[in-house]
Image (tube, helix red, strand yellow):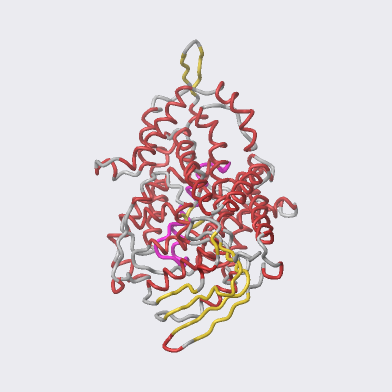
Amino acid sequence: MTARETWEFIQASVTGQFKAITIPDAPERAVPSDGFLGLIQNFRYDIVSGFIVFLIALPLSLGIAMASGLPPVAGLVSAAIGGVVVSQLSGSFVTINGPAAGLIVVVISACEALGGGSRGYHATLSAIVVSGFILFLLGRMRSAEIGKYFPATVVHAMLASIGIVIIIKQLPTFLGSQIKIREPLEIFHQLPHLLSDLNPFILLVSLVSLIILIIHPHIRFAPLKAIPAPLWVVLTASLMTAFLTDTKTYELLGHTFRLVPDKLLVRVPSDLSHCFAFPDFSAIRMPRFWLCVLSISFVQSVETVLSCAAVDKLDPFKRKANLSKDLCAVGLGSMVSAGLGGLPVIAEIVRSTANIASGARTRFSNFYHGLFLCLFVALASALLNKIPLAALAALLIFTGFRLASPKVFKETHSIGYEQTVIFVSTIFVTLATDLLIGVFSGIALKLLLHLFRGVKPSELFKATAYLEDGAEGDHYLHMDGAIVFSNYFCIKNLLDQIKTGGQVFIDFSATTFIDHTVMEHLAEFRQDYEHEGGKVCFVALEKLSSVSDHPQGSRRLERKR
């Protein structure tokens, strides 16, 4: 999956405004210094962007934690560690680290699988610690690039599944209902009960919050638009529920409804010492513990790698992140975060985009955002207890919708019908079982479809290709047989050997099949190589018939009958 594609599909922005921003290219000579010199030279830029990201991260971190089945403060711990600690260890420059909606599903599943309640929470913290250690090892082994080779459609389906589950899980809170939905597919028979149990006032708060999120990107009045949409949601919803100092009752259409502050508002301990929790490793011998570790590690590593690669495309200074170093940093950050009771730390694309759009220049913008969170919790944590859960549910439902919007389905279908089959089946299996099974079923189905297309079993994991150097800096990459996502690493190794500034000819004359994921990677290689002053030519690509009108759709050699 490419960084460009990742940017389009992972941007589950709760503001919706970042999709339209234009980030101007910066002159290469102006690349900011790193380290202490960068801190001094770019303080005025990074402190402002860090504050803006803090305003966005505060409500999101609370909502993500609660949706994950953890105390709301767990999200703040994760965001603070991501900013203060991970920023100084990572291999990226303007990426923001902290909790992300993409991990909600695996974390809440882990909590339920490991006992639920307080027991499940502490056991899940231990699973996050182990997962962080695994990510650290993967980074040390320089295996971060592997995450980019997963089939694009399967990753999109994974994200869409996460979005659907988030929406379903947050519906009761959005409606003000006390009914809980344990499994996603329960929604079909629980929906009538949810609607009959809704609380009209809470629904009003939720709808107002959702409307703010929808209209905010279209506001042209600069002073209003300058305040991030999540902050507007929190402020407006808090004012609507300011009267909830104790239990209230009201009547509407002959029905009596209760408003209980402890059930409707965020609850953060006033004593900071109560904000921390510690892992319980007693479940480490259970097989389901390791399944939870595997699920968290998989989603965390893939999303971190893809998000960092996407941020590289947005960086106006065109800097490239060290993905393996970033994976190490995220792993260490997750270990520290979970050791204190927090969520996993991840590279987060939406806040990173806001960071760049706000003028960030160095890693210290990430540091400042974490520092502002620490100061807020230390000095004004009582204000958090004024935030309605319904407002956070609206934020998450909006996020979930952007992950699983109809546009995602439409764009997937435009690539080819086989991509639609993989996409829909992966989502269905994920909703019916769990995320890990769904992802691997999607990969297995893609491999089966390749075999059906005529790809030989021996070609699935080994590509036949060689690199030839010509005169005057020309390079010729010859590829034989089928080139698919599962053998693309062979091609990537050859592409990495090519020096910049020359002319590259990628020869498809002996190629029989090339899948969508590889087409995306080759298109990205051409764009990056030509940006650095070189030139890339695709030779004999026209002899391969495309399965759709999409420029990066799969292509195959039509056999003569």
Residue 524 at what x, y percent from top left? Answer: 46, 66
Residue at 61%, 44% in the rendered image: 108
Residue 180 at what x, y percent from top left? Answer: 61, 31
Q: Which residues are magenta?
A: 68-97
Q: Is residue 290 visible?
A: yes
Residue at 46%, 38% in the rendered image: 392
Q: Is residue 72 magenta?
A: yes
Report the residue that reaches farthest toward the top: 254
Q: Is residue 388 magenta?
A: no
Q: Is residue 401 left or right of residue 208?
A: right
Residue at 70%, 55% in the rendered image: 290
Residue 295 at what x, y percent from top left? Answer: 64, 53
Quadrant containing the C terminus is bottom right
Residue at 75%, 52% in the rendered image: 286
108 or 89: nearer the eye?
108
Report the residue that reaches farthest toward the front: 561
> Eyeballing the image, is 261 above or below 103?
above
530 or 133: nearer the eye?
530
| Res 88 quadrant in image | bottom left
Q: Is residue 331 visible?
A: no
Residue 4 at what x, y percent from top left? Answer: 45, 60
